[in-house]
Image (cartoon, grey):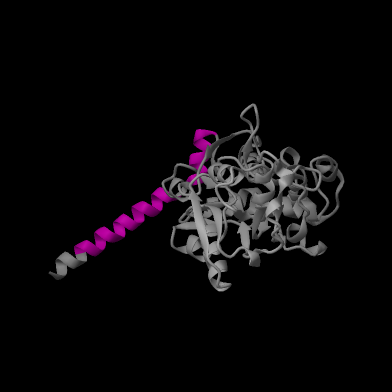
Amino acid sequence: MRQLIRTLGILTALCVTVVAAADAGTLDDVKKKGFVRCGVSQGLPGFSNPDAKGDWTGIDVDVCRAVAAAIFGEPGKVKYLPLSAKERFTALQSGEVDVLSRNTTWTLVRDTALGLNFTGVTYYDGQGFMVPKKLNVRSAKQLNGASVCVNIGTTTELNLADYFRANRMTYKPVVYEKADEVVGAYDAGRCDVYTTDRSGLAAQRLKMKNPDDHVVLPEIISKEPLGPVVRHGDDQWFDLVKWVLYAMLEAEEYGVNSENVDQMKAGSKDPVVKRLLGLEGDMGKNLGVGNEWAYNIVKKVGNYAEIYERNVGPRTPLKLERGANALWKNGGLQYPMPVR
């Protein structure tokens, strides 16, 4: 009996080792196949959305482009896989994608029980409510008994339940798997209220027949830190994706952007800039890529401010101010770890 238990223990250890080995080596696999497989949304303007030509744009897309730039020096070496909220984690767990960059909220359960790691926060958000102006609703506290359109299998669905329970109100959930189905149902009048992250409300509002007929209520009912996700068990890949974001933030903090990066590389005396752009130290080597990894990100994708402004900023249709997504020096929450 003892021998059987010992044998089973050895077999279990071997299985764990095999699984760990299978999970490791994502960076090598990406290099071999020549592109990054990126899981994105099925269409969320400003974050991950295909244009008329089928080209993907958005903050989440630019994260994947930046990862490709760090590895290959070419941001175009990415293949995008549109995923619903329900299928996104399975696609990452199974290895169908290398990184999930899909307006996904960082929570304790997702970071522990699903075998996943969040690599940082690309957008600090919070959940809100949208209603037709004709309802004359001014506050979410007036929504008792309302029907609410929501994505199934999301933190949005859970936050909705928490909010109504905490405020002793009732509601009727109207659930759909795909985001476009939720928006379409709300726009067609099949529910009174649409709820999702406030950035998502701004984005999805653009798809409605008459966007100006709808208003976002003032309440923010949750914390929604959105960011890229990778699998447990591969620290090298986790490190790389994590430091891609920090590099874009560090570049903004030190005034390095896609237009002046060559000038900064040639003439800056700042040790931080020199390390960031590969002139000093072996920062890239430590990540498993070339030492110009961050230079390539900034030159070919941009710093964090650039990707924010062109995708969701005040001059875009979404018109989102930086707010919590400003750098820490400007009163925001974005605080890059030092590249040194």
Relative vertical location of residue 204 with respect to residue 336 in this rendering, above or below:
above
**Residue 82 on image: x %, y %:** 53, 39
Q: Nearer the viewer, residue 75 or 314?
A: 314
Q: Decide whether residue 24 is among the magenta residues.
A: yes
How many marks are shown on the rendered structure? 0
Q: For the N terminus, which image quadrant?
A: bottom left
Q: For the C terminus, which image quadrant?
A: bottom right
Q: Nearer the viewer, residue 87 or 189?
A: 189
Give the residue furthest to the top: 53
Q: Decide whether residue 68 is among the magenta residues.
A: no
Q: Nearer the viewer, residue 123 or 282?
A: 123
Q: Nearer the viewer, residue 136 or 306?
A: 136
Residue for point 44% across, 44% down: 95
**Residue 139 on image: x %, y %:** 69, 64
Q: Is residue 334 visible?
A: yes
Residue for point 58% across, 51% down: 228
Q: Is residue 283 visible?
A: no
Examine the image and state in which quarter residue 140 appears: bottom right
**Residue 62 on image: x %, y %:** 66, 42
Numbered range of the magenta stretch:
7-34
Q: Is residue 166 left or right of residue 267?
A: left
Relative vertical location of residue 313 with respect to residue 335 in this rendering, above or below:
above
Residue for point 79% across, 56% down: 253
**Residue 175 on image: x %, y %:** 49, 51
Relative vertical location of residue 285 with respect to residue 259 in this rendering, above or below:
below
Q: Is residue 110 left or right of residue 287?
A: left
Residue for point 84% across, 42% down: 260
